[in-house]
Image: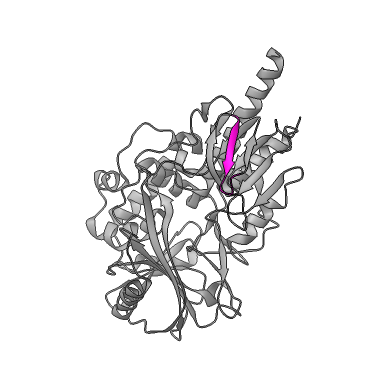
Amino acid sequence: MNPSERPVVIGGGAAGLAACLTLEKAGFSPLLLEGADRLGGRLRTDQLPDGTPVDVGFQVLLTAYPELQRWVDLEVLDSVAFVPGAMIHKGGRWRTLADPRRMPASIGATLCSGIGTWRDRIGILRLVQQSMRGTPESLLDAADEVSTSEFLAARGFSAAFVRDFLRPFFSGIFLDAALSPPAAQFLYTLRMMATGKVIIPVGGMAALVGALEGRLRTTEVRLGAEVQYVQEHALRLADGTEMKTGAIIDTVPRTEGIPWNACFNAVFHCEAPPFGQPIIGLLPEARHVTNLHFMEDVEPSGGKGKLNVTALLRDAQGVEAASMESAVREDLLQVGVDVGPLMWSVTIPRALPRMHSVCSSMRNPRIGSGMYVAGDHTAAPSLDAALRSGRVAAEALIVDSGRAKANG
């Protein structure tokens, strides 16, 4: 294949990396163009002043994700598993709510937590059973577009259980306090959490990016190559360079109308005692904070004395970090967590695409002659959907390339 005919993949995030890996397996040598100075897209790890890694936007990996299993050897990936449950601050104390199927030792604490009724607990078990029907992808491809909030209300969960657990827990996953994502996304996530582990790589999400990048063999990667304009079989970079291509897979959202969920992530110095195990803390009475974790519970050495906090933003436009820091401190003080100096913070205006309907991957990634799209904004707001969309777009390109050769 001539250089001008080789496929070009735009965007080096999860979708772009999966697309390149798929193309390589079919014998292609794609060109990967990434506008930033590193691969990974929204999978990004920063460092605190003392060198401790911290992800830009707290993220976890669900090991049951089919596409994650396809591309990453999770047995080799050095990681820490979170307890399947949460610590919930209510009535002046922390209460434990954990999955009794996998944490039998926590049954007593869970039953005495005061979180939810027997009907709520039975309801969750029934939802898990419902989520197990069919293939994982069939859940996302369901036609029902009712919101998660409406779905939970229709299933009869008590308002207190939704307020104290379901809303703060899943709002941290969806970055949406109203739980407006489709019930299909909720059920898919529930299945993934019920059938696998929730982990965080040692070294942060950069380790996951490194694992994906390390599998590339014939892909040429160009960093700092921001694509300004795309059309059939041609593109233009921000520096004015024009390129002719055989085919393009574009993983970068180019529609300004795409709505996004935003968040504020911060790390504070904190002398409060940690939970003693890797587990998420929820503050159902907080105005902004959706979850937190003591970094020492995840990384005993570098994480000592550090609290990682995530807060939701309804509109990131014009939000100042100083005002969010103050709001987060106020939320923490209400539960008796007095934090010290701010060590690091970031506002993420485009953390997750806000979608009212989802699917396992874009049903037809073809948008023109030799042009394909991928990314979580085309399917569902998750790492799994991003990876799958990249693979499906590349598979469509491979099929079309075979047809073109046959016709030629």
User: Would residue 119 be counted in the magenta stretch?
Assistant: no
Residue 398 position within the rendered picture, expressed as x and y whole percent measured from the top left? 66, 28
Q: Quadrant of the C terminus?
A: top right
Question: Is 145 in front, or is 330?
Answer: 330
Q: Where are the magenta residues, as a range?
A: 233-240
Q: Residue furthest top?
A: 407
82 sits left or right of 265 in the view? right
Specify whether residue 67 is in view: yes
Question: Is 175 in front, or is 198?
Answer: 175
Q: Residue at x 57, y 44 (%)?
A: 15
**Quadrant position of residue 50:** bottom right
Specify whether residue 117 is in view: no
Q: Is residue 240 above or below residue 336?
A: above
Q: Residue furthest front?
A: 240
User: Would residue 236 be counted in the magenta stretch?
Assistant: yes
Q: Residue at x 55, y 32 (%)?
A: 372
